[in-house]
Amino acid sequence: MRRRRVLPGFGLSLGITLFYVALILALPIGSLLFKAASLGPEEYWRIVSSGRALASYRVTVLSAAAATLFNLVFGLALAWVLVRYSFPGKRLVDAIVDLPFALPTAVAGIALTTLFAGNGWFGSILAEAGIKVAYTPLGIIIAMAFTSLPFIVRTVQPVLEDLDPALEEAAQSLGGSDAAIFRKVILPLLTPALLAGVSLAFARSLGEFGAIIFIAGNRPFSTEITALLAFIRLEEYDYQAAAAIASVLLITAFVMLAVTNALQARALRYTRRS
Amino acid sequence: MKITLENVEKTFDTFPAVRGVSLEVESGELVALLGPSGSGKTTILRMVAGLEYADGGRILFGAKDATDIPVRERGVGFVFQHYALFPHMTVAENISFGMKVSRRRRSRQEIDLRVDQLLSLVKLEGLNQRFPSQISGGQRQRVALARALAVDPGVLLLDEPFGALDASVRRDLRRWLRELHDELSITTLFVTHDQEEALDLADRVVILDQGRIVQAGTPREVCRSPNSAFVTRFLGDTNHLPGEIRNGRVYVGDIDIAPAATGEGPAEVFARPSDISWETGGPGVGATAIRVIDRPDGRRILAVTDRGHGIEIDVEPDVAVEAGSRGNLRFTRMNVYPANSARTP
């Protein structure tokens, strides 16, 4: 027997959704993988495991991890402040958080380079301390952190807002210190949202291009990111190699999203009914 | 432990939530704070817990001034209205939370043993590994109670403990909680807006209105001698008729219904539905039945007096009356207050 549904429009909305998913997501990704696959296994392996490519993976993944870690701490703090306290200018700060989404990443990259170059506002101060940011991996991390900050803030913020204040009061009445309450009550409840934000921020950092190429210096084997390497191959009209390198990024991002999804399901296991 | 409130005050922004409340709860006593919403009852409970600081006055636990002791050092067990169980922890982890974060180190065996003891105390043996989302509302409430008792509090505070439960579960839990209290004899203060719950459970009922205590006493005292129109109305169904006191008699309209205790002049007469009888002859206030509602334990007559006041009367199941019947009302018990003192709860 056909099951009757209460909500109308299931067939239509599902059809439209699947059509667009196919058109704007699956098709380009499929053609990319198809292009890469046309290389043949040996040639593919030679390109994706070349020394220059390996070095680019290393700097990309490590920088993305560092940027995500930084945003995990800073983004959580920012969301915390925006939810828990009221202060003048709070709405402005709240709006500024989304700026990295709105700003063309190349503009962000140029602005960051200007600030962190040896003669820039921050760069000149840091140079005195012997820290060089522009044209080093540190610059890559800063550019990645800049563009991926909103993901963590915006995923944690609503969960933090919905957190029942009675939970903390209960923990207090049971004698919990602020640190114990944060560690044992608040943090576990934020974990699923944090994981979601982390996976988005990390995936975005892996693929970030515009903001990084201005500040990174782009020296092969040291500050050349994977996305740039793919772009360089593209400019050399070596489309297959570009697709091969891009496919590595794609697979990495996909695996990482799958892993965080599994972790999230684990962290949310208490919501399952018996 | 004895709890003493001395002239406690609390204002939120400009709203005076609690205005000069003084109260003594004897050690081992079970006291209900009863009042309509906005009467300040929950604020008082939260101030006793230390979840809210008093703007004025003092709160003493025994002889010790607890007014400025923060909640985590006050040693109270608090059961929240919606229980506030930690959703990511199992029942056992919820109950042991207080023992684990306490400065006093306990061994794992000691904690497990205590969790099992508490679970059997609240009749939930074997639910240790369930998550709060996997148990019923009544079970959650008992887990919350076990969690509060785990830290050996000197005082137990419950905020609308049965508010979120079904009527049948509610009554069973109420009786059970009373038995538990008699067993543990821990000083307990609970908040409710349900007069039946307060009368059913408490040794003493404290009735609040607009941030002040209106009346405090045993259930018998407040039921039999409510000291104001507000208390009379709040404690249950009641009929309100304008009356007058003349020469030591109470009159409704021109009918003399009872001797008056005090005063002279306009008065408010209150009588419960079961304190009025429906007579077909003799003296009494004339009325016409509009509708008769049949209930398992009797009949309720909705009637209008000849002067146009709506009135409800409970009579025996076998009384013959129907819509349109004429009758005379005789008052067997009533409360009379000077006019204009009545406030609708």
Image: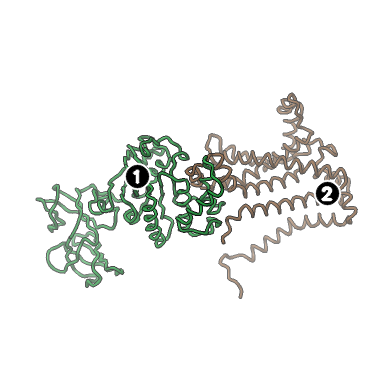
Chain colours: A brown, B green
Judging from the image, mark 1 belongs to the subunit labelled B
Farthest left residue in view: B247
Q: In the drawing, what numbered circle is on residue B187?
A: none
In the rendered image, residue B263, in percent from the top left (x then y), is placed at 14, 47
Q: Is residue B88 left or right of residue A217?
A: left
Categorize mark 2 by other alpha carbons within 10 Å: few (<14), some (14-19), many (20+): many
Residue at 28% x, 53% y: name it. Answer: B219
The amino acid pointed to by label 2 is Ile
Amino acid carrying mark 1 in the image: Ser
Q: What residue is shown at x 50% (from left), y 54% (from top)?
A: B116
Same-subunit check for callouts 2 and 1: no
Give the percent coordinates (x, y) of residue B6: 33, 37
Judged left or right of residue B303, residue A82 is right
Farthest top residue in view: A128
Across and down, in percent, residue B308 comes to 21, 60
Residue in the picture at 23% in, 69% down: B316
Inter-mark Cα distance, 2 to 1: 76 Å
Depicted B43 relative to depicted B160: above or below? above
- Picture quarter containing residue A221? top right
Which element type, helix, strand or loop, lies under badge 1? Answer: loop
The image quarter in which residue B175 lies: bottom left
Position of the N terminus of chain B, as image quadrant, is: top left
Specify few, some or many for label 1: CA neighbours under 10 Å numbering under 14, 14-19, or 20 or more.
some
Residue with the mark numbered 1: B27
Which residue is the site of mark 2? A245
Who is closer to the viewer here, B322 or B65?
B65
Marks 2, 1: nearer the viewer: 1
The subunit carrying tag 2 is: A
